[in-house]
Amino acid sequence: MGVSRLDVFYRRLLLSKLFIGGWGKPEDLKRIFEFRKYIGDRERCGSLVPEDYPVHINKTEEHTGYQIHEGFFISPLEHLVPGILPPEAVKARFQFIVPKKWQKNRPVCIHLAGTGDHFFWRRRTLMARPMVKEAGMASLLLESPYYGYRKPKDQLRSSLKNVSDLLVMGGALILESTVLLRWLEREGYWPLGMTGISMGGYMASLAVTNWPKPIPLIPCLSWSTASSVFTTGVLSKAVNWKELEKQYAINSVYEEEIIKLLEYCGVDSLKMAPEFAKNDDSLSPSGDVRVSVGQSTRAGGEAEAELVDQVLSSGTSGGGLGYLPRSPGANNPLQGTKTESTKCSRPSLHRESISFMKGVMDECTHMANFSVPVDPSLIIVVQAKEDAYIPRTGVLSLQEIWPGCEVRYLNGGHISAYLFKQSVFRQAIYDTFDRFCLKYPNMH
């Protein structure tokens, strides 16, 4: 399957660069990875957020057929990893859109924000208000760290300044979602579920891995890991690779210390690469991209091959996507000695930086690095067949990670689905909630 031309064209219209500040402080990355070990294990982190964590409602607006409650609470991440959040992001804000008349039960779906979704207008207009009318379902819209009221003063629009910002956002949203789910339970709402589009789908998926009960999950236009988004998807062209390469080359802490903290080693991981490096056939003579996954080799389409070639246009031969050429005598393909003369000029630097990005992103966003949701049959994933933002080639599928989940495919790409398929997303939400009620009628 090729990629959407609209996705590629739309990306070219956006001139802003991602991660202009680089990787983020090495100490911050270390703290995030250590914290990931806890939230990646549902049993270990069950007590991180108290059952009665305080949530406040500070404003209520009356509308025809529904109310909008505005509320806030302090992000638990501020207590657990002090100072990792920017000051503007410490207070988590949300809107709660509640129907004045319930049709059946008191269902609530939490919506996490997609890329560029500042404040609440987009989710309220395209999802929450139609859901009140169509299904009598309430929606809780949580504002993400680094967005809207929670955006740092020195951040340009939606362009996260550091790679570490995205990882901090994920950790915060996992904990904040737990706060809201527990608050909604205390307030007597049922059933509860989670959804999100694009980045919001990734974040909702991560949050549900941490929830200790069966829960509906509807991730839309997201997949099993965010690593491919920033290494082979069209967004990889927006990444400030020049700054990332420079920092990676000059500061040895990234490849000498931080890499040792990366634990994910699934069959689509850079840590599996040495087994595949012997064959060195990731780029076939015909130009098709072949990505080794386990014992199988998958051929990507021409368009995806072109994208990968653009991203990996460092002018070097050998070595494939997702790993680095092994240097003589090196046990770890990502480790080696650096000299002043080779730090910023070695030809493999671009490839090394991409592999480091893959490792960092897999560590904190790969669903296989987190607990499996309690009941995967309550998950309906909605995917676009020609999504150029969320590549699926060469990474584990969600069906492999979450056996029993359902995947629905839309024709077209990421942007067209985001703009015109909201009704399909809403139907998937209704179907998942219905499935939950049939399977667990006595849980509330």
Image (cartoon, rainbow, N blue to C red):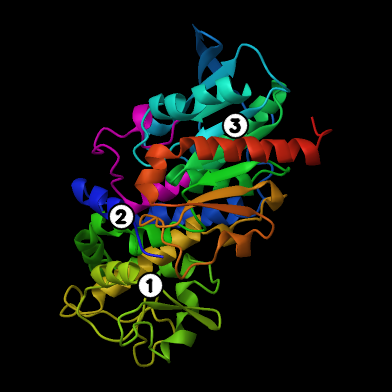
Q: Is residue 404 above or below residue 140?
A: below
Quadrant position of residue 153: top left
Q: CA distance from mark 3 to mark 1?
A: 43 Å
Quarter of the figure with the N terminus? bottom left
Quarter of the figure with the C terminus? top right
Q: Magenta-highlighted stretch: main secondary structure?
A: loop
First in sequence: mark 3 or mark 2? 3
Name the foreground residue: 363 vs 137. Answer: 137
Residue placed under numbered mark 3 in the picture:
109
Looking at the rendering, the stretch of residues picked out in magenta corresponds to 143-170
Name the foreground residue: 72 vs 2. Answer: 2
What residue sits 60% from the left and 16% below the top? 99
Residue placed under numbered mark 2 in the picture:
235
Depth check, mark 3 against mark 1: the one in front is 3
The amino acid type, in three-letter code, at marker 3 is Cys
Q: Residues within 10 Å of mark 3 (few under 14, many from 20)?
A: many
Q: Is residue 143 above or below residue 352?
A: above
Q: Position of residue 197 (x, y in %)?
A: 46, 42
**Side of 335 where 19 appears, left or right:** left
Q: Position of residue 267 (x, y in %)?
A: 54, 74
Q: CA distance from mark 3 to mark 2?
A: 29 Å
Dot 2 and dot 1 residues touching (CB under 8 Å)? no
